[in-house]
Image (cartoon, rainbow, N blue to C red):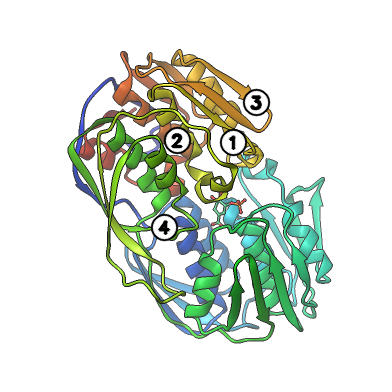
Amino acid sequence: MSPPGADRYRVRAGGSIKGSLTVPGDKSISHRALMLGALADGDTHISGFLAGEDCLSTARALEQLGVAIERPAETEVVVHGVGAHGLAPSPAPLDMGNAGTAMRLMMGVLAPQRFDSTLIGDESLMRRPMERVAVPLQMMGARIHTREGRPPVEIRGTPHLRAIHYSLPVASAQVKSAVLLAGLAATGRTELTEPAPARDHTERMLGAFGVRLQRDGRRIAMEGGQPLTGTRIAVPADFSSAAFFLVAGCLAADPALTLTNVGVNPTRTGLIELLRRMGADIRLQPRTAAGDSDAEPVADIEVRRSALHGITVPETLIPNSIDEFPVFFIAAACASGETLVRGALELRVKESDRLAAMAAGLERLGVEHQLLPDGLWIRGAGELGGGTIDSSGDHRIAMAFAVASLKARAPIEILEVANVATSFPGFVDTARAAGLRIEAL
Ligand code: S3P
C-alpha cells in the first residue's frame, strides 16, 4: 500500500511488464452515472464505479443538492434519484476539486434549476476555461457568471430554458454534455453538431435512462422534457487508465500483458490506432456483442513488447486520444525516429498545460524535442535518462513519467503526485504488480 498522502514517486529504471490486471472504473462514465441517476425517477445501481477523488467530488456535490447516495461497497453505488425537479439548493458553494468534467457537466444540470448555485474547485480547476460551456447555456437563456471565463461559476437558476441548435466550436464532450443536460430541462428540440466526434458516453447513457435521442454522424438531436428512469449501469475499466499500461506493455511486456474488462468505446480508443501505426502488437478480445448503439463496448486487451517507430499523428485521431497524449509522448520518446503532433491546442487547457509539462519532463530525461504552439515534435531516443520530474500536479503527467522508467538508464523521481488519486486510486500497487519498480514516498 502507498503511504497516505504520498506526494512523490521514486521509480527505479528498467523492469519488465507481464500478467493480467484490471484498472479502476471509467471516470467519464462514473460522473455521468451519478448525475443522470440523480435526475432520474427511481434508483440507479452503479457497479464498477470509480472511487477516485474526481467522482467523489461529483457525489458530494449531488449530496449537497439533496440527493441520497449510498455506497454499499467501494465500487458499488446506489443513487436515489430525485427526478427532474427534485434538486434542492446547496447552502454552500459546490467544490468540484480537480474535476473539470464535474464542473462543466454540473453547469448544465444547475442552469435550469429554480435556485442559484456557485461552483468552485482546486487551484488547477480555478484556472480552467468555463466560457465554452457558459456561452451555449447563455444562448439557451441561462444566467451564468464567470470570472473572466474561469471559476468561480455563479449560476442564477432559470427554469425556462429554450432549446438551441448549436455548432460546437471545439470537439468537447464536456460542452456537448452540458448542453444536452440543460436541454433535457429546456422547451423544444436541442440540436448539436460536433466538429469531430467527441466521446459519446452521455448520449449512450441517456438512452439507457430511457431518453430518445437521434444521432447521425456528428449531429445529435433530443426533445426537451423527457423523463429519466433509474437503471443499472455497469462501468467498465477506464481506457484512459489502461493507456499507461498499454504503453508500458509496448515498451516492456514479456511475454504479454492483458488488461481486462476495458471500455473500448471507439470515441476513446484513438491511442490503440496511434500505437499500432507505430508498430505495436495490440489485440482485442471483445466481451460485449456489437449492435446495441447505447451499450458501452468492453474488451480484454493484450499487448506485447514491440519495436516502436515514430509517426506523424493525424489530427483526426486527436479528439479520440486527447487524454492519452502524456503517455503517448513517452511512447514517442522511446520509439525510433521522429514523432510530430500538431493541432492539439486543447492539451494546453487540461489539468495542466500538458504540452509544456511534457516538454519540461522530456528535457529532464534528455529527449530531443521541440515545443510547438499546438503540439510537440519528438526525436525518439530509444533509451531515456533519469532525473526529477515536476508533474505540475497533473495525474496523467505523473503516471506517464512512471511508465518512462521502463526505458530509463537511471531512477526517475516524480513530484506532486497526490492527484493521481483523482482518476487512478491504487496506481502504485497496480503498477508494481505489473512490474514497474515504483514506490510512493
Ligand atoms: C471528458 C471530456 C474531455 C476529456 C476529459 C473528460 C468527459 O474533455 O479530456 O478528461 O468526461 O466528458 P473536453 O470535453 O474538454 O475535451
Q: Is residue 41 above or below residue 52?
A: below
Q: Residues within 10 Å of mark 4 (few under 14, many from 20)?
A: many
Q: Secondary structure at mark 1?
A: loop
**Where, by quadrant of the figure, is residue 154 drawn?**
bottom right
- 3 relative to 151 in the view: left or right: left
**Front position in the image: 32 or 75:** 32
- As drawn, the label of residue 328 is 2
- As drawn, the label of residue 352 is 1
- In contact (CB < 8 Å): disc 1 and disc 2: no
Q: Specify the quadrant that holds the N terminus.
A: top left
**Which numbered disc flags the more N-terminal residue, 4 or 1?**
4
Q: Residues within 10 Å of mark 3 (few under 14, many from 20)?
A: some
Identified by mark 1, the residue type is: Ser
**Which numbered disc flags the more N-terminal residue, 4 or 2?**
4
Q: Is the distance from the Cβ of mark 3 to the nearest ligand 1 atom less than 8 Å?
A: no
The residue identified by callout 4 is: 26
Identified by mark 2, the residue type is: Phe
- As drawn, the label of residue 372 is 3
**Front position in the image: 4 or 411:** 411
